[in-house]
Amino acid sequence: MNDEAGRGRVQFGACLASLRTCAGLSQRSLAFRLCAVAGITTLTRNEVSRWERGGCIPDPWLPSLAQVLGVPLDDLEREAAHARGEAEPPGCADRAPDTYAQDAMGWLLAHDNRHGGDHVADAAVQVWEAERSRITGEDKQHLAHVAEIGEVAGWLLHDAARFREARATLTQAYTLARLAGDSPLEWFVLDLIAMIDVHTGRAGEAAAIADEMLTGRELPGRVALMARVRRARSLAQAGDRARALAALERATGALQDSIQANEPAFTWWIDTTEVELHTGEALLSLGDPEAALRHLRRSSAGSKGGGRRREFGNVLAELTALVQLGAWQDAEAPLLRLEPILRTVTSSRTRIRLRSTLRAIDRDAPAWLADTAREVAAAG
């Protein structure tokens, strides 16, 4: 591979490998998420490896790569064009004027995945308000574009523990998605509203949203799965163990189905790790940390390499269950695993829970573990 084109492919492959590493993904995880976004099941880690070795430039996959890696599509197209020896990426002049906002939100989501939402929530709100002010009529494509920005802004506000603002933003985004006739986006925003209601203890409202999603419509499998998970979490908060566990059992069974072509792109993150986490959290709400721990240990292990902010929440859930059980020896490992995460991740939503868990350690644990907890807290 001594020709100029070969060198270009190798350079592009190295760039792609660097982006994947920064996103905290293995080649296998990237392949899985690309399959979920594209609605297929045939891409493997071997193909990703081939791209990164410079075997070929994955032109058909560039939009999906930009979405999964959280980078602007313009940048990937420019790198690919450079690798081919072209001055400009094809079709660059035809990009829609909304590209800036889409790319900005992609970067903000990528930051949240690695570092949490605290420091980018305000930027997301600024883009959301600017794009909302540009709505002039009933252009459904533009309405959907603005609704998607509102969805991202709402998620980032939630991660920054600004729950009231997050719910208000998502409610407005839901209205725009309905006006645009974008059902998948409408489902996604509804799910996020239910997520906030679960997190803030509004069990009745979360259950009502889940029931609305599941009644009288044909939802794609993983959309219905998450609605059942939200419903299970709300039932657990209300103390209804039997119905909560039944809903979780249905969700877990649905996860075994293969990825279907009609699954919306946003469902790529709905995986075994996510369902294990929510099962464990529901059992914690039901006052059963021993049963919860089995699931939370699996979700904690599965979250490694899937983004530091996600890992933070999963490891902390495992630690919380161990603290409730008084399993002090076992609690040390997840506690120490949190230390490097705390240096770079600022998610107020998760840190609120961390402070509560650390207070319980300081109050109830042996002195050696309480000292370790204080050192970990100081690292963040």
Image (cartoon, rainbow, N blue to C red):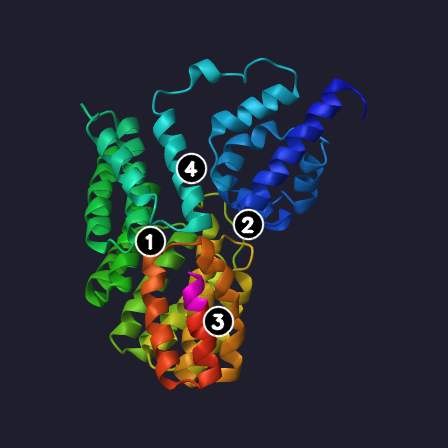
Dot placed on the residue nearer the N-terminal end, 1 or 2: 2
Q: Percent x, y for residue 130?
A: 23, 30
Q: Quadrant of residue 363?
A: bottom left
* Helix, strand or loop for disc 4: helix
Q: Is residue 225 left or right of residue 128?
A: right
Say if the magenta span includes residue 266.
no
Q: Give 235 or 4, whichever is nearer the viewer.
A: 4
Q: Residue furthest right?
A: 2
Q: Give 213 or 307, whichever is nearer the viewer.
A: 307
Identify residue for label 4.
Answer: 107
Q: Amino acid at mark 2?
A: Gly
Dot placed on the residue nearer the N-terminal end, 4 or 2: 2
Q: Which mark is residue 159?
A: 1
Q: Amino acid at mark 3?
A: Leu
* Helix, strand or loop for disc 3: helix
Q: Quadrant of residue 56?
A: top right
**Range of the magenta residues?**
376-380
* Helix, strand or loop for disc 2: loop
